[in-house]
Amino acid sequence: MSAEASGSSGGPVVTVTGFAPHSTIRAGEEKAGRNLTSSKYVKLNVGGTLHYTTVQTLSKEDSLLRSMCDGRLEVTIDSEGWVVLDRSGRHFSLMLNFLRDGAVPLPENSRELEEVLKEAQYYRLQGLVQHCLTTVQKRRDICRGCHIPMITSAKEEQRIIATCRKPVVKLQNNRGNNKYSYTSNSDDNLLKNIELFDKLGLRFNGRVLFIKDVLGDEICCWSFYGEGRKIAEVCCTSIVYATEKKQTKVEFPEARIFEETLNILIYENGRGSGSGGMALLESGSVSSPGVSQSDEDGAGAGCGDRRVRRIHVRRHIMHDERGHGQQTVYKD
């Protein structure tokens, strides 16, 4: 595509090639009614944003852009050979990349995503329209699916767990009943546990019901339920006896918590029913460094040898420079 200038008594004339053979328009004027049937490359001025692409790219979908190229839609070409589109050019490069690649990352910001959707609808890019609508629906589902039930009583919690068809992960965190001071990093670890709970809620959205309980006595404790009964428990709280004072210690066994969340997925859609699911859970897993595992009999008649796996950080004794012991004792 090229433009050549020549003088005349009527002022400079610009010869535009590539849009229509030997078509001429006077400098400073705009010419409507042209098409791009004879073009290979196209210069686009979209709301002041300039783009350079090919007719092949613009014609990949049956859209308004293809209509411009094959003559079904008249276009406006300015004196410099730019096809003028009276639209915002903010997201037009995203439109072109979608036509080139067939897929494109969409903005994380909801407002920007709506803007892309509006532009895709205007240009009648149905593939991109559907991509935007699907993404919007997925994000809405995540927001709905990650709703955490507000527990007001122990009976309500038991009812939710007993009637839920999904596996359940519960985080109990409550500092109100603690009468001891906390160790230096306990607050940080408590926050890390809460953040991990939120991350797991997003990751396993729709597959696991997550409950946050602030009514119990435990400061930080994870419980995992399948088919209405507790399968495993990870307690992150201990009492540290240091010289003459007692302190509360909160741990963050991230690997163990994530492992138990994966284990609980065998109860998804009732797949944990029968001996197969229990055999998988009770076959014995390797304990992570720094933790110990003990089994206690499960409650309820007819449970047979089903047990709740309770995991605590391993009991340890440390000594300071004067030989005084610091003994960690766990609440069962």
Image (spheres, grey):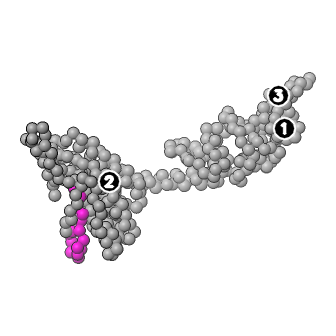
Q: Nearer the viewer, residue 274 or 121?
A: 274
Tell me what residue is drawn at x 33 percent, y 69 percent: 280
- Tell me the mark number nearer the camera, choosing from 3 and 2: 2
Task: Give the quarter of the image for residue 159.
Answer: bottom left
Tell me what residue is drawn at x 31 percent, y 51 percent: 254
Whether the residues at callouts 3 and 2 have beta carbons within 8 Å, the answer is no
Specify the label residue 17 is tagged with: 1
Highlighted range, magenta? 298-312
Q: Is 306 part of what is drawn in magenta?
A: yes
Q: Amino acid at mark 3?
A: Ala
- Residue 45 to residue 70: above or below: above
Label 2: few (<14), some (14–19) or many (≥20) C-alpha neighbours in 10 Å: few
- Tell me the mark number nearer the camera, choosing from 1 and 2: 2
Label 3: few (<14), some (14–19) or many (≥20) C-alpha neighbours in 10 Å: some
Judged left or right of residue 66, residue 8 is right
Task: Give the quarter of the image for residue 224.
Answer: bottom left
- Which residue was labeled with disc 2? 255
Q: Position of residue 238 (x, y in %)?
A: 18, 50
- Which residue was labeled with disc 3? 27
Q: CA distance from mark 1 to mark 2?
A: 66 Å
Q: Nearer the viewer, residue 131 or 275?
A: 275
Q: Position of residue 277 (x, y in %)?
A: 34, 71
Magenta segment's dominant SS is loop
First in sequence: mark 1 or mark 2? 1
Tell me what residue is drawn at x 63 percent, y 52 percent: 102
Judged left or right of residue 281, residue 3 is right
Task: Give the quarter of the image for residue 85.
Answer: top right
First in sequence: mark 3 or mark 1? 1
Tell me what residue is drawn at x 46 percent, y 55 percent: 141
